[in-house]
Structures are given as C-alpha cells and as structure tokens.
Amino acid sequence: MRTTGGALRSWAVAQAQDSSAVGLLWLIGLYILHVPLAPLWALIAAVMQIVPHFGPILGLLGPVLTATLAWRDWEHPLGFLAFYAVVAVLDGVLLQPYIRRRTARVLVWASIVARIVLGIMWPFCMRTKLGTRGNVRLTVRTGEFARSLGFCGFSMCDMKIYP
C-alpha cells in the first residue's frame, strides 16, 4: 500500500508540475500572439492538461475560436495551431521526461524512446475487423509479439469492442 501511495503521489506531483509548466508556456505564447483573454485560456489549458489524451485538445478549442472570431482570418488561428504543435512537442519530448525523472526516477531516454516507438508502432498494430454479425472487433496484428514484450495483458491483445 505504501508503494502504491508513493507512486500515485509522485504521479500527481509530476502532473501538477507539468500542467503548471504548460500553462506558463501557453500564457507566454498567447500574450505573444495577442489572443484575447490569454490568462483565462492559459489557466484552462493548464487544468485540461491533467486529462489524458483529450485534455490538451479541449484546452485548444477556446483560444482557436477566440483567435478566429477576433481577427476573422485564417492566419491567426493557423499561427496558434503552430504554436500549439511547438508546445506539444516541447512538453512530450523535454518537459515530461525531465519532470518524470525528477519525481518518479524514470530515465529520460527511456521516456523519449517509449513515446516514439509506441507512437509509431501502435497505429500499425491495431486494426478494425467487421465480424460476422456486424460486430466490430478490435484486434492486434502483432499480439504475440506485443505479449512477449509485456505490452499487453492477457485480454489487451484480444480486446473486443461491441457497439
């Protein structure tokens, strides 16, 4: 129980530090790009950074819509999307590995390599098949390989999703 509590505490501290750093980057970038309500959007982006996968995208919607409505052109929202891409790469390649090393003692190179390898391999490993009754089954092509590396639990590689 103590080990689990320590790991969760380390994760929470790392998430809070990462969210704060990303919020600060957003604030600086939004001020540079002159997006209206910059502190509000930076705060929302920092809070949404905690939500995995969808949080950063949801935090992106407000500033893009604000930039679109404020300037009524495509250049400002496009510039903001380019800024978002820079922040996402900085966060994924520099900030998170550094923060994880400090809080959870995860090796920086292992964190970066894992992101790159899984980001490249995972979409190619997954496929969707239409079952005999119209059921959609999600399977992993390289299930045995993934299982041998320990990426999949006993049911992860043969996961079935029914509508």
Image (spheres, rainbow, N blue to C red):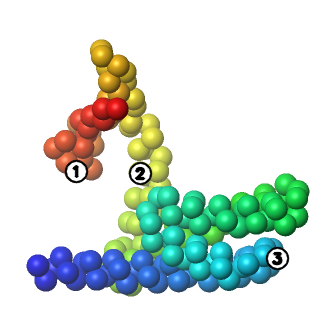
Eye-nearest disc, 3 or 1: 3
Q: How far is disc 3 from disc 1 in space, using C-alphas?
A: 47 Å
Hey, which residue is sitting farthest left in the picture? 1
Viewport quadrant of the C terminus: top left
Residue 7 lies in what quarter of the image?
A: bottom left
Between residues 51 and 112, which one lies in front from this camera angle? Answer: 51
Q: Is residue 10 visible?
A: yes
Q: Residue at x 44, y 37 (%)?
A: 124
Q: Residue at x 88, y 59 (%)?
A: 72
Under mark 1, the amino acid is Gly
Viewport quadrant of the N terminus: bottom left
Dot 2 or dot 1: first in sequence order is 2
Under mark 2, the amino acid is Leu
SS state under label 2:
helix
Residue 15 lies in what quarter of the image?
A: bottom left
- What residue is disc 2 on? 118
Image coords of residue 85 (percent x, y) = 65, 62
- What residue is disc 3 on? 34
Q: How far is disc 2 from disc 1 in space, using C-alphas?
A: 13 Å
Q: Is residue 80 visible?
A: no
- What residue is disc 1 on? 150
Q: Is residue 101 left or right of residue 31?
A: left
Residue 70 lies in what quarter of the image?
A: bottom right
Q: Residue at x 57, y 61 (%)?
A: 58
Image coords of residue 140 (percent x, y) = 32, 35
Q: Residue at x 55, y 82 (%)?
A: 21
Q: How far is disc 2 from disc 3 in space, using C-alphas?
A: 36 Å
Q: Is residue 84 left or right of residue 154?
A: right
Dot 3 or dot 1: first in sequence order is 3
Between residues 153 and 146, which one lies in front from this camera angle? Answer: 153
Under mark 3, the amino acid is His
